[in-house]
Image (spheres, rainbow, N blue to C red):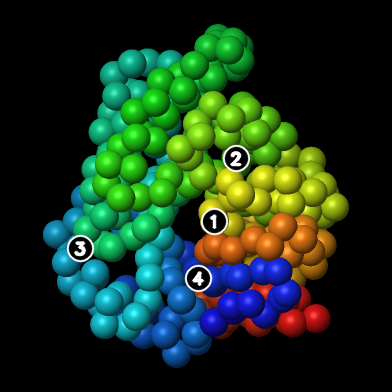
C-alpha cells in the first residue's frame, strides 16, 4: 500500500487486470502485495459479455479481500465515430459497461474521449463534435450510476494532453485520468507533466503510471523507460494531490507488476 508516502501526495495504488490473469488468484496476490484496488479492462478475456454473468461472484471476491475496483471501458470502441449508428452502438456498449462497473462496486470508470474518424475525410471540428455527442450522454450516464467518469488523455485523437483542458472546461462534471505514457508521446516532458498535474490537480482523480522508452505506448513498469516520475510526483505533491493510480503494465507476469510497485514506493519515499 502506498499512502502518504510522499508529503503532499495521498496515492492509492492498483494495477490492471486483463489479458490472461485469473481473477481470483490475482486478487489474492494483490492483497498479499498490498495493492488497494485493481483496474479491470473490459476487453479480451474480461470483455463485458464474457464476465457480466460473473459480476456477483467477482464483487464478492473483491469485497472479501478488501480490494477496490476501477473499471476501464474498452478502448477499441469508437465513441467519436462519424457514423451515427456506430456512435450509438459505442454509447450503448459504454453504458452497459458502466452498469457492470456499478455491479462490481466500482467508484470510477475510465474511457477514452477519442475519435478514429478519417482525418482526410472529416475536419477537426467535426471530429470533436462526434466525441462531444457521445460525451454529452456518457458523462451523465456515469453519474446516474454512482460512478466518476475519468476521461483519459490519449495520443491519436484531438484530445491529447495538450488540448485536454478544453475538454475539462466543457465537461465540469467529468474528471481526468492522467496517463504518463500518453503525455510523453504527445510531446510532454517531465517538468511539463509536473506543471500540468499541479495546475489541474483538482480535476485529476486517477493516474495511469505507465513507462515507455518513447516512440510507442509500451506499457512498461515505472522505472523501465525514460519518464521522469520523480518530477511528476513533485508536481502532484505541490498541489496536495490525492487519488488512485494504476500500474497499467501490459503483462501477465506478476513479478513485473510488483517491480513497478517497488519503483513507485522508492520514488515516493526518497
State the residue at coordinates (74%, 71%). Answer: 223
Which is in the foreground here, disc 1 or disc 3? 1
| As drawn, 222 above or below 110 | below
Determine which quarter of the picture holds residue 119: top right
Residue nearest the viewer, comparing 182 with 35 = 35
Which is in the foreground here, disc 2 or disc 4? 4
Camera sees residue 179 = yes
Q: Tell which circle, 1 or 2, labels the residue nearer the N-terminal end.
A: 2
Q: Residue 176 appears at what percent x and percent y?
A: 55, 46
Determine which quarter of the picture holds residue 121: top right
Q: Tell which circle, 2 or 4, labels the residue nearer the N-terminal end.
A: 4
Task: Kindly identify which numbered label has been placed on residue 14.
Answer: 4
Question: Quarter holding the N terminus?
Answer: bottom right
Structural distance between the alpha carbons of marks 2 and 4: 20 Å
Which is in the foreground here, disc 1 or disc 2? 1
Q: Residue 216 appears at what percent x and percent y?
A: 69, 48
Task: Kindly identify which numbered label has been placed on residue 55.
Answer: 3
Camera sees residue 214 = no
Q: Tell which circle, 3 or 4, labels the residue nearer the N-terminal end.
A: 4
Label 3 element class: helix
Structural distance between the alpha carbons of marks 2 and 3: 29 Å
State the residue at coordinates (61%, 70%). Answer: 10
181 relative to 192 in the view: left or right: left
Circle 1 residue: 206
Q: Residue 63 appears at what percent x and percent y?
A: 27, 77
Label 4 element class: strand
For label 3, count other residues whose C-alpha is less than 10 Å away and answer few (under 14), some (14-19) or many (20+).
some
Circle 2 residue: 154
State the residue at coordinates (43%, 69%). Answer: 38
Label 2 element class: loop
Amino acid at each position: 500500500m502506498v499512502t502518504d508516502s510522499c508529503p503532499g501526495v495521498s496515492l492509492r495504488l492498483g494495477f490492471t487486470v486483463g489479458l490472461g490473469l485469473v481473477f481470483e488468484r490475482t486478487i489474492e496476490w494483490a492483497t498479499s502485495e498490498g495493492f488497494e484496488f485493481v483496474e479491470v479492462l473490459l476487453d479480451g478475456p474480461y470483455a463485458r459479455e464474457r464476465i457480466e454473468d460473473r459480476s456477483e461472484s467477482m464483487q464478492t471476491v473483491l469485497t472479501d479481500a478488501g480490494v477496490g475496483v476501477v473499471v476501464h471501458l474498452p478502448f477499441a470502441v469508437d465513441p467519436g465515430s462519424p457514423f451515427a449508428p456506430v456512435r450509438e452502438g459505442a454509447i450503448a456498449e459504454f453504458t452497459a459497461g458502466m452498469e457492470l462497473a456499478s455491479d462490481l462496486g466500482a467508484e470510477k470508470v475510465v474511457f477514452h474521449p477519442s475519435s478514429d474518424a478519417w482525418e482526410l475525410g472529416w475536419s477537426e471540428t467535426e471530429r470533436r463534435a462526434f466525441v462531444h455527442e457521445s460525451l454529452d450522454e456518457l458523462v451523465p450516464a456515469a453519474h446516474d450510476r454512482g460512478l466518476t467518469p475519468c476521461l483519459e488523455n490519449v495520443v491519436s485523437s484531438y484530445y491529447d494532453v495538450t488540448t485536454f483542458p478544453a475538454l475539462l472546461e466543457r465537461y465540469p462534471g467529468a474528471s481526468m485520468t492522467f496517463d504518463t505514457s500518453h503525455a510523453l508521446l504527445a510531446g510532454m516532458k517531465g517538468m511539463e507533466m509536473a506543471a500540468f498535474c499541479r495546475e489541474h490537480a483538482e480535476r485529476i482523480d486517477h493516474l495511469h503510471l505507465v513507462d515507455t522508452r518513447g516512440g510507442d505506448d509500451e506499457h512498461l513498469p515505472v522505472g523501465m523507460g525514460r519518464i521522469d516520475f520523480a518530477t511528476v510526483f513533485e508536481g502532484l505533491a505541490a498541489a496536495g494531490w490525492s487519488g488512485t493510480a494504476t500500474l497499467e503494465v501490459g503483462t501477465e507476469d506478476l513479478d513485473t507488476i510488483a517491480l513497478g510497485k517497488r519503483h513507485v514506493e522508492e520514488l515516493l519515499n526518497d
